[in-house]
Amino acid sequence: MTLAPGIVERLSRARADLRMGVPVVLVGGGQAVLAVPAETLGAPRLAALRAMGGDPVLAVTARRAETLKARAYDGDLARIVIPPDVGLAWVQAVADPADDLNAPMKGPLLTAREGDAALHRAAVMLVKSAHLLPAAVVLAVPNGLAVAAEHGLTLIPVDEAGPVLLRAAALHPVVSARLPMAAAEAGRLHIFRPDDGGDEHYAIEIGRPDRGAPVLARLHSACFTGDVLGSLKCDCGPQLRAALAQMGAEGAGVLLYLNQEGRGIGLANKMRAYSLQDQGFDTVQANHRLGFEDDERDFRIGAGILRQMGFGAVRLMTNNPAKIRMMEAQGLRVVERVPLKVGQTAQNAGYLATKAAKSGHLL
Ligand SMILES: Nc1nc2c(ncn2[C@@H]2O[C@H](COP(=O)(O)OP(=O)(O)OP(=O)(O)O)[C@@H](O)[C@H]2O)c(=O)[nH]1
Ligand SMILES: [Zn+2]
């Protein structure tokens, strides 16, 4: 073992760089690019990129390209040509759907079809994993190693990074302590920390559940607006409290509080989605217009925590069949689905109907 950071650690550094608008260098397949998120790019750095020579493109997901009516020649991705006479505002307006309805005149947008898009794809994946809008300004450079060394930029070999970006981060228990709660006095909070520098996740254990029998379990995704603020736009807060109450009443259970805010897109992007919902789009359409899939969560995390805690079978409190499928795919037996129907309001009726119609939720 050397003192030098490995690929997992370098990716974590890269995410921090990207969140501040510092470009990273991606290399692979004999090619190299500079990549920087459209969202955090500043005008001076765009000018500096252009001064390197060559033509930067804006890599977006096929989801975003569809809204923009831009051809996605790379399957799940489109490389939009950035005209030489446009500035940062143009780049950001293409990346961000906030003003799509006010200013629908962005096109026609030209997209690249020649050459390989593997590095562009890696750039978008990395930007997405940093919880930014999934759009990256990408510039091909002749010598990635030299550019990284000259400017002190993080260098990521994509052959090494690809498998790391696709796997579920390894989680290890950090600490647990007794936590009496209104719903159950016999509570214990466990903290799990991922090895990739990402968010910690929590397990709330109620009572002393028998590891040999199916445990009453809930995989709850963080919802700051619902859980903390009592938002009427979703049913998360009431679901959280009802799950804890049922576990308290039965005397045993485990609730995982997974920090996957906004179905995995982060709170800032969720608020972008809420703005789009105020323009008339539903929860799924809003995610797509931003360039995301309907649900970007990784449910392997929850299965991994349950297994580490010694559970192999669950009575899962959910209305979402995808959670059941993912748990079973991860080798956890779901012996029963326990419906969790609380918190319906006039304001969230449309949201719940969309989840039933488009995401397969059980009513
Ligand atoms: N992107 C996005 N996320 C939302 C929206 N409304 C709520 N969320 C998030 O959706 C997640 C809700 O997760 P869960 O409570 O696990 O809900 P679920 O997948 O419907 O499954 P069950 O509640 O188990 O039936 C939380 O992370 C919320 O922050 C929205 O309009 N857009
Ligand atoms: Zn919510």
Image (cartoon, rainbow, N blue to C red):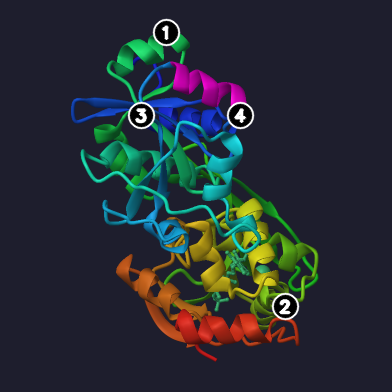
Residue visible at 47% across and 63% down in the picture: 67
In the image, the segment drawn in magenta is: 42-51
Residue at the disc numbered 3: 7
Q: Label 2 near label 3: C-beta < 8 Å?
A: no
Whole-percent x and y of residue 136?
A: 45, 39
Q: Label 1 near label 4: C-beta < 8 Å?
A: no
Q: Is mark 2 within 8 Å of ligand 2?
A: no
Q: Label 3 near label 4: C-beta < 8 Å?
A: no
The type of residue carrying mark 1 is: Glu
The type of residue carrying mark 2 is: Pro
Label 4 and label 1: CA atoms lie apart by 20 Å
Q: Residues within 10 Å of mark 4 (few under 14, many from 20)?
A: some
Please identify the quarter of the rendering in which residue 82 is found: top left
In this rendered view, identify the residue nearer to me: 358 or 81: 81
Please identify the quarter of the rendering in which residue 87 is found: top right
Residue at the disc numbered 1: 150
Q: Residues within 10 Å of mark 1 (few under 14, many from 20)?
A: few
Q: Is residue 234 magenta?
A: no
Query: Above or below — where is 55 with respect to 124?
Result: above
Q: Residues within 10 Å of mark 3 (few under 14, many from 20)?
A: some
Residue 238 numbered mark, or none:
2
The secondary structure type at the circle numbered 4 is loop
The secondary structure type at the circle numbered 2 is helix
Q: Is mark 4 within 8 Å of ligand 1?
A: no
N-terminal of the two: label 1 or label 2?
A: 1
N-terminal of the two: label 3 or label 2?
A: 3
Label 3 and label 1: CA atoms lie apart by 20 Å
In this rendered view, identify the residue nearer to me: 355 or 207: 355
The type of residue carrying mark 3 is: Ile
Of discs 1 and 2, which sits in the foreground? 1
